[in-house]
Amino acid sequence: MLDAWFDVWDRLRLMFRSAILGSVTVTLAIGCGSVTANKGDAAGTGGAAGTSGAAGASDTSGAAGTSGAAGSSGAAGSSVTGGGARGGVDGGGGASGSSGGTGGAAGDCNGTLALTGGYVGETPLGNNMVPLPMGGAIADGTYDLTEIDDYVPSTPGPTAEKETLRVTGNLLERSFMSNTDPGPSYYRYTTTTSGTQWTWTYICQKTGSGPRSYTATANTISIRTGNYQYTVYTKR
């Protein structure tokens, strides 16, 4: 009887042990890690615009504007879990400077030369021979128009003129007015002589140059102004 009880007890103990082992719960904890991907830093700033070129002075071109400075680069992005860093976007270059100013307009003649002589009309000299130009040294000084001589077949016109020349080395100044012109005109020239040719080249007001056949004495300058006409200037 006692043996049977111990047998039952052993069976119950074995069953109890199996129940305990079978009731063990294995828990698998899966961590939910969070991954945060940081973006790259902000884009770099653009470069500053270039400065404008200065306006040109009279008869000259303005200087070109300077180029803008290069934009700064963006900073490197922060590191992210599970990925590489990404840098910020580079800033763009600055805008180019504007072009230089335009050149100034051609200057007017600045200066005056008083017209002191009276109006001179054309004088007919009939069949007299047209004198040949002889050239010569042109003395510095101020000369007033004193004669306009017409030779046949040239005939006098209705126009009367006032004119004054001032010679200073190779510089020639000229004031002119006619009875049909509302006011005096002032011109300046550089001049050269070669043989019987006296060449005037405009400094202001107009452009170009032209030779004039002439004869010079100590006190006069005679310029051939046509095939049959001479204009005579007398030194003051």
Image (cartoon, rainbow, N blue to C red):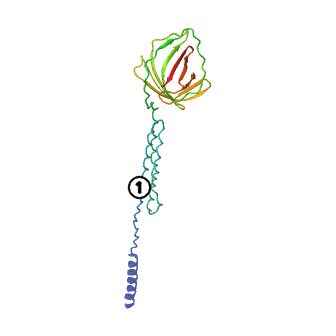
User: Residue at 48% across / 19% down in the picture?
Assistant: 146
Left or right: 207 as drawn, with respect to 49: right
Q: Neighbour class for label 1 at 10 Å: few (<14), some, many (≥20)? A: some
Left or right: 171 as drawn, with respect to 4: right
Given residues 62 and 78, the one toward you in this image is 62
Q: Position of residue 113 (x, y in %)?
A: 44, 28
Left or right: 191 as drawn, with respect to 94: right
Decide: is 157 above or below 209.
above
Q: Position of residue 91 (x, y in %)?
A: 45, 51
Of all residues, the one furthest to the bottom in this rendering is: 2
Mark 1 — residue? 42
Given residues 147 and 197, the one toward you in this image is 147
Of all residues, the one furthest to the right in this rendering is: 195
Decide: is 111 above or below 46.
above
Given residues 43 and 82, the one toward you in this image is 43
User: Residue at 40% across / 76% down in the picture?
Assistant: 22
Q: For the N terminus, give its image quadrant.
A: bottom left
Decide: is 114 above or below 97.
above
Q: Position of residue 55 (x, y in %)?
A: 44, 40
Q: Work out whether residue 213 can be spotted.
A: no
Q: Work out whether residue 128 can be spotted.
A: yes
Amino acid type, label 1: Ala
